[in-house]
Amino acid sequence: MTFSSPLRSASAATLAVAISALSLGALVAPAPAHANGAAFYTAELATPAAERTSIIGGVAWQCQGTACVAAKSNSRPVVVCQRVARELGEVTAFTAKGKALAEKDLARCNRK
């Protein structure tokens, strides 16, 4: 009959928890939308964004100057655009999956 040391069991459990936490963190950590060409939304702002990264409506936006990109969300494009305009300022152009918002929708987007 072999007895294992309680210290050895605790170390193994601690290591297992640490590995699980790191693995989960890698799965849920947001990746930049433009890093792999996966940008679903693009927004062109009237003035440069103050922050390079912004979380707007649960979506991580990456901005460089006036150009911003993000991955897909569950909201309609006009709603996403409105959230961006509210947080980052006037949006001069907005696309979802490569399709530009119509002029009337862009006007709705910027309405306060």
Image (cartoon, rainbow, N blue to C red):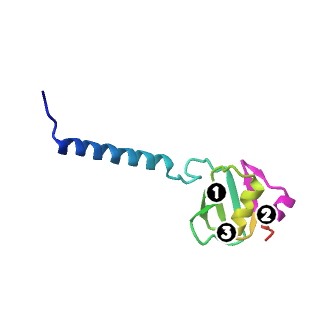
Q: Which of 105 and 42 is in front in this view?
A: 105
SS label for mark 1: strand
Label drawn at residue 69? 1
Amino acid at pointer 1: Val
Q: Which quadrant is home to the N terminus? A: top left
The residue positioned 74% from the left and 66% from the top of the image is 91
Name of the residue lying farthest toward the right: 104
The residue positioned 84% from the left and 56% from the top of the image is 102
Quadrant housing residue 3:
top left
SS label for mark 3: helix
Is 98 magenta? The answer is yes
Question: Residues in magenta?
Answer: 93-108
Q: Name the residue under label 2.
A: 109
SS label for mark 2: helix
State the CA–CA distance, disc 3 to disc 2: 12 Å
Amino acid at pointer 3: Glu
Q: Mark 3 points at which residue?
A: 87
In this rendering, which labeled residue sits more in front, label 2 or label 1?
Answer: 2
Q: Is residue 107 left or right of residue 52?
A: right
| Dot 3 or dot 1, earlier in sequence | 1
| Dot 2 or dot 1, earlier in sequence | 1
Q: In this view, does 1 lie to the left or right of 42?
A: left
Q: In this view, does 56 lie above or below 50?
A: above
Is 107 magenta? The answer is yes
The residue positioned 34% from the left and 48% from the top of the image is 18
